[in-house]
Amino acid sequence: MTALTGRTIATVGSGVMAEAMIAGLIRDGLVTPDRVVASHPRPERRHELERAHGIRTVAKNVEAVRGADVVLLGIKPQMLAKVGREIAPALDDAQLVLSVIAGATTAALTGILDHPRVVRAMPNTPAQIGRGITVWYATPAVAADQRRQTAAILRALGSQIEVDDEKLVAMATAVSGTGPTYLFLVMEALIDAAVHLGFARHVAHDLVVETLEGSTLFAKQSAMHPAMLRNMVTSPGGTSAAALHELEAGRLRTVLSEAVWAAFRRTQELGDQLEASLAAPRPPADPADAAGPAPDAAVRPAPARARPGGSRSRGGATGA
């Protein structure tokens, strides 16, 4: 028996990361396909998920949310306001909401969903093959058994680390979340350099990819500091020493550090922008309302506006 035995998982926004999670959960035997439901507006995507994983799919987000123990939000940030207001009335107090939405803070999530049990997680690209690492933060309302469920779900993507300060999730976004981008750029540059030397591109690709993978595994298994590993292959006056001189002269360390800080600042900006957009009043549905009544029209009451995070009654599962 696992933390997820008998639990139902619903995915809202069933894209690449959600599918990776679904595949990992089923592959590892943490849930059976009949305990997973995914929502998606496009019929062809629903059929694709059904064929690949044997799960149930639905067209409407609210239908997926009802009755689920864990609701995974994998939508784009700009869709949070719309989808959040849509599913909020259907959420039950006991449900866990697990968000992998980039930049979405727990303040934004709990506000738009009017729901206290929220986990904010940041996986990275290698999660698609079960080799990622995810940093996550849970709000105080998330129960101990739900934290165990979260850890089990995220382990299906690779490694996972729970933190007690949400700021660390934003920091992880700049390091591990964006990290593959830095490495892919280095990979691309090394391949191009090898081609410039005279290698065929497919040979250059294999040389670089295998070198990076082997070096990473060596560093992991040796548990040695990277500086020690570097010194092991740097002979006085040798090829590594000559190459390192050029890298240091080009400020490689400083550029990488500045890139990480830029990613961190952008993550914070996205979170602030998302919170501000969710707190702003919703625009009127009728453009004529925004312009005010016509001169000869009687004054009418202003149309009702939904307030993000407004109160609603609780008490078990509710209908939409």
Image (cartoon, rainbow, N blue to C red):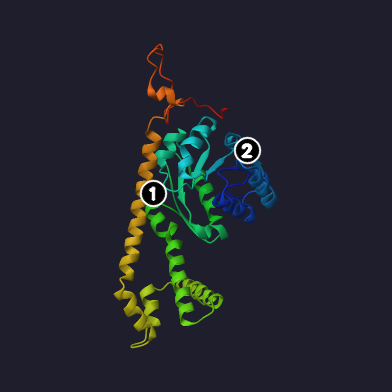
Q: Which mark is drawn over residue 130? A: none
Q: Residue at x 56, y 55 (%)?
A: 156
154 to 255, vertically: above or below: above
Q: Residue furthest front?
A: 296
Q: Residue at x 68, y 52 (%)?
A: 52
Q: Name the residue type under label 2.
A: Ala
Mark 1 residue element: loop
- Name the residue carrying label 1: 164
Q: Residue at x 34, y 75 (%)?
A: 247
Q: Toward the viewer: 163 or 312? A: 312
Picture coordinates of residue 107, whole percent (x, y)? 39, 39
Q: Toward the viewer: 293 or 84? A: 293
To which quarter of the image does residue 294 belong?
top left
Residue 169 in the figure: left or right of residue 47 = left
To which quarter of the image does residue 68 belong?
top right
71 to 48, vertically: above or below: above
Mark 2 residue element: loop
Mark 1 crowdedness (10 Å alpha carbons): few <14, some 14-19, many ≥20? few
277 to 126, vertically: above or below: above
Q: Name the residue type under label 1.
A: Asp
Report if residue 115 is visible in the image.
Answer: no
Report if residue 200 is visible in the image.
Answer: yes
Picture coordinates of residue 34, whole percent (x, y)? 68, 44
Q: Which mark is drawn over residue 59? A: 2
Q: Toward the viewer: 283 or 100? A: 283
Quadrant placement of the C terminus:
top right
Residue 62 in the figure: left or right of residue 76 = right
Q: Nearer the N terminus, badge 1 or badge 2?
A: 2
